[in-house]
Each structure stands twice: as structure tokens, then as C-alpha cells.
Image (spheres, rainbow, N blue to C red):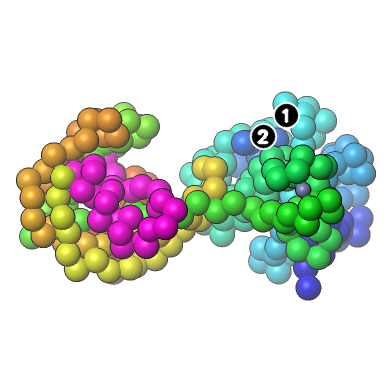
Amino acid sequence: MVKPYSRPADDEPAWWCVVSSDQILVTEDNDLPFGCLQDMSFPDLNDYTTVFIGELRERSCYLVVADYLDDSFADGSFQSLRALLDTQDLEKFALAGRARQFSDFLSTHRFCGRCGTRMQAVDWELAMHCHQCQHRCYPRVSPCVIVAITRGDRILLAQGKRHKEGMYSILAGFVEAGESLEQALEREVHEEAGITVKNIQYQLSQPWPFPHSLMMGFTAEWAAGDLHIDPHELVTGDWFAFDQLPTIPPHGTIARTLIEKAIGKDSQ
Ligand SMILES: [Zn+2]
């Protein structure tokens, strides 16, 4: 059983996810700090919430919740989680994402949403509990569908308003309360592109900690309708021939994996 609020022995090597707001402490070479507590240049962790969040390569990993703009950690600098995505180490990125989500959860659940009483951390699972009204909260996960749609030898790619300039990706959207994944997918595709799809196939998922999405990835085929790109959500979009793709998301993202699956490149 996991003891979430535990600390390693001073001489036990461990991974350290020190999270401050939406940033994480990374070393000079964009890695997570690793080492024994006694060798780290950390402040006294008795002043910080420290949570065991799992293992990476048979070593324990701890989240340390730092203050906003905390400058007392000298083992690196606070960066966006995306710095770790750039290193292509997806296991490490996932662990850091977990740390970031837990940190966010702890800092936004100090008081009960039902009765306003200060909440207490549960010592045997990662949850916050209200002893006044028994309300219990867990870290929020927001399901999101993402789909690569093909039409013959072309694939639908669109430029989102928040995408980096010039980058095209596949369609994605949040699942609404009461919807199945398939319904959410069909609604999003219709809203954003004006088309209907068939042959919807689940492929894979990826936690996406910006801030707490779980991306569930599908492939599908165009069924009917002309393309009408929704100007509220997207800048532009079109069908692209498989051998003439624009700039697409980097390796390590579920969007990239789905695009490669859809165009038959994933086994190369
Ligand atoms: Zn309560």
C-alpha cells in the first residue's frame, strides 16, 4: 500500500519532482534532479509537503510542493514541463506530469468545496478529506478525445489557435459530462470540421498534464460532409496528402503517434 506522505531515508537515492505552480525543477541538462536527500541542495523539507508518487527505473520518486517563485532550491531552475518533453524521455515526462497534477490538486483542495472546512490529506491514498461533512476529493482527470481522420490517401490536419505558428495537428476536444467517448468524438469533429466520420477505432492514450487531461486517441475515416473549419477554435485546416504533410507535432506526443498510425508510417 502506498504511503503518500512519506520521505526517503537521507541516504536513499531518489528522483525529485519539485513543483512550483506550473513549473518543475530541472537540472542544467534538462533532467529531473536525482540523488540522496543528504547530497541535495534542498531547504529543510519539513517546511514542504512531500509526497511519494511512484517509481522510475526502480527508484522512488517524490513530489515536493514548492512555493510560487521559490528560490531556495539550488539544484537547477524551474522550467515548464515541456522542457522534459523535449528530451523525448516519455517515462520521465509522465512522472513529472503526475507530480505536477498532484501538486495542483493539493494546492486547490485545501478547503472543502461543500462546507468550507479545511481539508486533511488522507494518509493511505492520494486524496483530501473533509472530516466535517465526509466529502473526499481525488486529483481531477479531464478526459479528452483526439482523432486522426483520413479520407483516402489524405489526412485532416488543422491549425489550432494555441498551436505554435505553422504547426498543424489533428482534432481534439474535451468529453462533456454524460457523453461517451464516441459521442464526444463525433460531436467535436462535427463542430470543428463540419463532417461525420465512420470506422472509429480506439488506439492509445496519454496523460497530458496541461493541466490534467487524459488524451484518448482514435483513428477514423471521413464518412460525409464538406469541410467547414470552425473559426472560433481553429485558424485553418485541410486534407493533406500523406506524402505532403505540413509541420506536425513532435515525437512523444499522442498526436504524432496517431498521425503516423493513420498514414501507415508507425511501423517504420
Ligand atoms: Zn466538508
Say if the magenta span includes residue 239.
no
- Disc 1 and disc 2: Cα gap in Å? 6 Å
156 relative to 76, above or below:
below
The image position of residue 160, as x and y in percent, is 30, 35
Q: Nearer the viewer, residue 147 or 154?
A: 147
Counting residues from the start of the chain, the first of labels 1 and 2 encountered is 2
Left or right for 137, reference 219: right
Going by the picture, which residue comes out furthest to the bottom? 1
Task: Answer yes or no: is residue 139 visible.
Answer: yes
Q: Secondary structure at mark 1?
A: loop
Secondary structure found at label 2: loop
Determine crowd level at label 1: few under 14, some 14-19, many 20+ residues with C-alpha closer than 10 A.
Answer: few
Question: Whole-percent x and y of residue 52?
Answer: 77, 58
* Nearer to the camera, 151 or 195: 195
The residue under the point 20% across, 56% down is: 149
Whether residue 177 sits left or right of residue 68 in the image: it is left
The C terminus: image quadrant: bottom left
Residue indicated by mark 2: 21
Horizontal and vertical percent position of residue 212: 54, 48
The answer to whether the residue labelled 1 contacts the one labelled 2, judged by CB atoms less than 8 Å apart, is yes
Q: Disc number at residue 224?
A: none
**Three-letter code for the amino acid on which mark 1 is drawn:** Tyr
Residue at 78 percent of width and 73 percent of height: 1
**Residue labelled with disc 1:** 68
Magenta-drawn segment: 168-193
* Relative vertical location of residue 98 with respect to residue 210 in this rendering, above or below: below
Disc 2 marks a residue whose amino acid type is Ser
Along the viewing direction, whichever of 238 and 248 lies nearer the viewer: 238
Figure quadrant of residue 113: top right
Is the distance from the Cβ of mark 1 to the nearest ligand 1 atom less than 8 Å? no
Give me the residue at 82% from left, 30% from top. Answer: 72
